Structure formats: structure tokens, C-alpha cells
Image (spheres, rainbow, N blue to C red):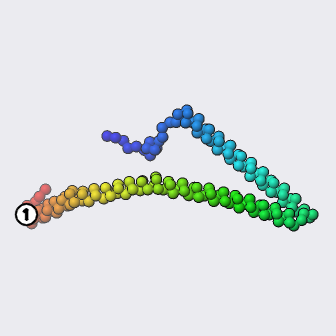
Amino acid sequence: MTTPMTEEQNYSTPPLTPEQLAEMREKERQQKQTIAIVSAIVVVLVALLGVAIYYLLQPTTPTDKIRDIFIIVVALETLVIGVALIVLVIQLASLINLLQNEVRPILQATSETVNTLRGTAEFLGENVVEPVIKLNGYLAGLKRMLELLGIKPK
């Protein structure tokens, strides 16, 4: 007799080799380095923007310079939004790919399994359950007939 597998046993993964561990650590290091670089760039840009705003708020600054700086800031903001939209479209494309190539086959296999179970249930209902129910009905009728005749069935 086999023992049922627990959920933890069912989904466990094999241990990683030293090469795989080293590769994972290298990827994590690269991700941390990338995050640090992007964070530094954002901090520098915010600092430059703060310095620019400070000098633009001086009473002697002409209005046309303020306008020019504002146009540059809006252009940079548009550039950032454009990059974000490109990233969004790429992520959407990968999601569509995932749905088509991985989720759809799983749903098709599940549908086939449900259809198989439906057929099995119909087969069992027609060939096992229905005859047993009829037999029980006949036996109950026979028992009642014997009781009416005065014979006590066990």
C-alpha cells in the first residue's frame, strides 16, 4: 500500500549544484548592482533638478530661462514616460506569450480530463449503479411478497 504524498513532497525541487548556486549568486549580484546604478542616477537627476530650481527662483533670473528649463524638464518627463510605455508593451507581449504557450495547453489538458471523467461517470452509472439499484428494487419487492405470504425472510 502506498502512502499519499504530502504537498511539500509533491512540489519539492532537487538540490542545486554548486555551479547553479554560483550562477544564482552572480545574477543576484548583477541585479543589486543594476539597482544601485539606477538609484544613483535618479538621485543625481533629482539633485540637479533641485539646484536648477534654486537658481531659477532667484529674483534676477529672466522669465525666458525659466520657460526653457521647464520645456527641458517636460521633454525629459516625456522621455521617461515613453520608456515606461515601451517596457509596458514588452511585458504585455510576454504575458500574451505566457498565456498562449503555457496556460492554454494546461486548460486544454484539464478540459480533456474533465471530459474523460464525465464519460467514466456515465459508464459507471449505466453499467454498475443502475443494475444495482434495479436489483435492490427487485429484492425489496420479493421481500415484501414473502412477508405477505407469511414467510419471514432473514
The C terminus, quarter of image: bottom left
Residue type at tag 1: Gly
Residue 4 in view here: yes
Q: Which residue is mark 1?
A: 150
Residue displayed at 60% across by 58% down:
88
How many numbered callouts?
1
Nearer to us in this view, 144 or 40: 40
Quarter residue 53 falls in: bottom right
Q: How crowded is the residue under tag 1: few (<14 C-alpha within 10 Å), some, or many (20+)? A: few
User: Residue 70 appears at what percent x and percent y?
Assistant: 80, 63
Q: Is residue 76 found left or right of 129 in the rendered image?
A: right
Residue 23 position (above or below residue 56): above
Above or below: residue 122 compared with residue 33: below
The correct choice, above or below, for 133 with respect to 22 in the image is below
Which residue is at 84% across, 56% downward? Answer: 51
Q: Nearer the viewer, residue 126 or 31?
A: 31
Give the structural element (helix, strand or loop) at label 1: loop
Q: Residue furthest left?
A: 149
Q: Give the left or right position of residue 95, taking residue 59 as reference.
A: left
The part of the image, by quadrant, that contains residue 48 is bottom right
Determine the residue positioned at 35% across, 56% down. Answer: 112
117 or 131, which is in the foreground? 117
Q: Quadrant of the N terminus?
A: top left
Q: x%, y% of residue 86?
A: 62, 57
- Examine the image and state in which quarter residue 149 appears: bottom left
Image coordinates for residue 98, horizontal then vertical, percent:
50, 54
Q: Is residue 136 visible?
A: no
Left/right of residue 142 with respect to residue 91 in the rendered view: left
Residue 45, given in percent of the width and then of the height, sits at: 77, 53
Pick whichever, 104 or 15, lies toward us.
Answer: 104
Which residue extends farthest top? 18
